Image (tube, coloured by chain):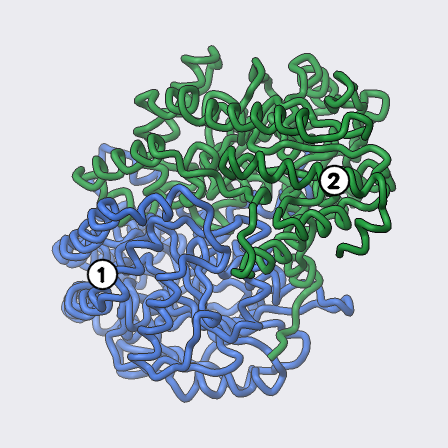
Chain colours: A blue, B green
Amino acid sequence: MKPPLTQLGHRMSRLTGVRAIMKDIIETLSDAEVEWINLSAGNPVILPEVEQMWRQYGRELLEEPQFGEVVCRYGSSQGYEPLIEAIADTFNTLYGWNLTRRHVLITPGSQSLYFFAANCFGGVSPAGHSQSILLPLSPDYTGYNGACLDPSVLQALQPNIDRLGPHRFKYCPDFDRLQVDDTIGAILFSRPCNPSGNVIATADVERLALVAAQHNIPVLVDSAYAPPFPNLAFTDMDLVWGDNIIHCLSLSKAGLPGERIGIAIAQPELLHPLECFLANAAIHSSRFGQAIAAKAIASGELAQLSKTVIQPHYRHKFERLEAAFDRDMPDDIPWALHAGEGAIFAWLWLEDLPVSDVELYEAIKQEGVILVPGQSFFPGLQEDWVHKRQCLRISLTATVEEIERGVTAIAKVVERTYNKPAFAMAAK
Amino acid sequence: MKPPLTQLGHRMSRLTGVRAIMKDIIETLSDAEVEWINLSAGNPVILPEVEQMWRQYGRELLEEPQFGEVVCRYGSSQGYEPLIEAIADTFNTLYGWNLTRRHVLITPGSQSLYFFAANCFGGVSPAGHSQSILLPLSPDYTGYNGACLDPSVLQALQPNIDRLGPHRFKYCPDFDRLQVDDTIGAILFSRPCNPSGNVIATADVERLALVAAQHNIPVLVDSAYAPPFPNLAFTDMDLVWGDNIIHCLSLSKAGLPGERIGIAIAQPELLHPLECFLANAAIHSSRFGQAIAAKAIASGELAQLSKTVIQPHYRHKFERLEAAFDRDMPDDIPWALHAGEGAIFAWLWLEDLPVSDVELYEAIKQEGVILVPGQSFFPGLQEDWVHKRQCLRISLTATVEEIERGVTAIAKVVERTYNKPAFAMAAK
């Protein structure tokens, strides 16, 4: 039976952006004949020290009377009180923020936080005009697309490209393109950025927040990779705080993706509509994960392991990947890696690429290497910018040895593609 | 700062139905001067045997290598594979359904299941007309209201009232009012019913499903209180299965509300849009709860404890409440309890009540007893039916002794109200 879906039902059933390509990737990887090098994954590595910490706090909770209260009772929509306290205390201690318990909201994963926010702030205004969610620097996280009930509310800006050397570059917000008025409902960006590893400069974040504040617009800073956990910043970065900032955390890269914990830190009046939406749509976030997170955060151990285990693991892999590219890629081809400032991906730009990113992805697949073509990572960018079809996202979740072999294969296909594009195509 | 909310943001921020009254209840209960008898709660009792079972399976999981895969990795949007298997096997064994793994979807609580379904099936159709979610028997679960992005899609039908005795009654669907056509996107009801404890007769469910099937419309059966778990049916009831039925379970009344586990069982093409919506809005459900639920369901222990511990606990309380009403309430007042066929509430109808249900709630509060006025439990029922203001919901989560003292207080206020309504009002 094919049920009668609403317009929204049809929209939310679609496979957009990276989900469409993920379907191809999953089908490809399930071909057991080939031993794939998988550089596509967003699923973080299980690091033994981190798993052990979560297991230890889990065991502790299982022996406490509190366990019954945690899992056998409904909780508050705002979140589990000890976790809220641990978050407020940690940010007050580390960064001198003056958070009370009312400044924290726990959501069932940060994706759902963006879902609530994208639709509370983006869509049709009470006066009937359209309010956009502005992504001030494209590329950015592809999941923002699915978070919008009406994806046309996403409006992304093309960045400036800062060339840091012959084979290195960095995106920067193009303030000449930034026009903020009451057609914007909120500003949103990830920092560090999935997919590019970019960390928008502190001064630029402050400037964005200021412009937004002048128009009474909230700024969501997706800090899924930021300090203090998982602390996947490979460059010094300051967190920016202000009355119109919604600082958004996730524990997914801090070893707890299975438990779906998102955290919003903001002025209570910004959190109120999100909490109500959460209560109506899901009652509250699940509590076992919240309870062990409260322990790991309150003790300081999560921040500690983030610094000493999680960050070095990915930073080391990025360095090895960078060295492999410098070694294997032909110098006379205009390839460039984005500055590795954070997150768990490398981002490769191939200027003047003679084929599209998807065609290149297919050719690289022929060499047994799976990565993600870049064009999915420009949600909300309407312009037909050729750069959108010149990038690849390479995951740092594979082993160093796999990454190095993968880069060798990528280099081989890239070289062939620039020199004999027709040949590269025929390999499909 | 007051952020610029969208129309949807304003709607989802509202406190509707029972949430408005819950605010008053929470504020009232926080008055520590009074020792309240709380007959308002929806938070189930922690039963020691049930808590012990969840703790045992939690400990087991904590000692298994699998724990890392469960909490330290992203999972599939459809749900945790062993839980999906346990559900399919259990329903095939107990009821002879021919479920495969593709017939099961796990959601972050059943509230979110209704949220996804209410908006995939209710709202604006591709052709631009409005599709309703039809509640064929009002009163029903107040949370359906919050689940709808546009609450005006809810359309509820006034029931027939079957008088079972001088002080007993039962709601039945009024098929004369039932008109199904393409303005209906789905049919939805709880069975057993929160708030009334009603179990719609099997033949009536089959008739509803048949009429719906003729119009290609899915029927969501909210089985949050049904067998095989939590098995809070105090009367024999058959589960009804069919190609257009989405059978919806919850583990919240089976001792796991904190972990937010909803389960949909249906044909894969009915689940597909819900799974996509879930993936876009929340990625997947949290996994610790799913993993211990897989163990408790696969072993048969959850079904067993539901039958031997959970069901008798509430059934006994309902019997004591019923006896207390028969003992304490004046026979010459037209009070009537709904047949106690299941769930964790009693539902009192006071025909010809001289004041409103909210006024009566306020008067009963003066006696130190908190319950919930009935008018919140008619979501989608537009008609100004006087019955909507003549009912009270009484929770069975208090102790027997509290329930009995509560009934005595209720009887006292009710008697005074019918005899001297002005006096009852003055007590406010």
Query: Can I make out residue A158 in this image?
Result: no
Image height of A326 relative to B210, above or below: below
Foreground of the two, A119 or B428: B428
Q: Which part of the image, by quadrant, shows the C terminus of chain B?
A: bottom right
> Which chain contains the residue that carries disc 2?
B
Q: Residue drawn at (50%, 61%), measured in percent from left and top?
A: A114
Q: Residue drawn at (63%, 32%), measured in percent from left and top?
A: B346
Q: What element carries label 1?
A: helix
The residue where tag 2 is placed is B378
Image height of B298 relative to A113, above or below: above
Foreground of the two, B8 or B325: B325
Q: What element carries label 2?
A: loop
User: Hey, what amino acid is under mark 1?
Assistant: Ala
Q: Which part of the image, by quadrant, shows the N terminus of chain B?
A: bottom right
User: Hey, what amino acid is under mark 2?
Assistant: Phe
Foreground of the two, B197 or A45: B197
> Which chain contains the residue that carries disc 1?
A
The CA span between labels 2 and 1 is 65 Å
The residue where tag 1 is placed is A411
Image height of A253 relative to B205, above or below: below
Image height of A397 relative to B60, above or below: below
Residue B10 image position (x, y, % from top left):
68, 63
Foreground of the two, B307 or B178: B307
Residue A410 image position (x, y, % from top left):
24, 57
Query: Can I make out residue A100 in this image?
Result: yes
Residue A420 image position (x, y, % from top left):
31, 58
Residue A193, image quadrant: bottom left
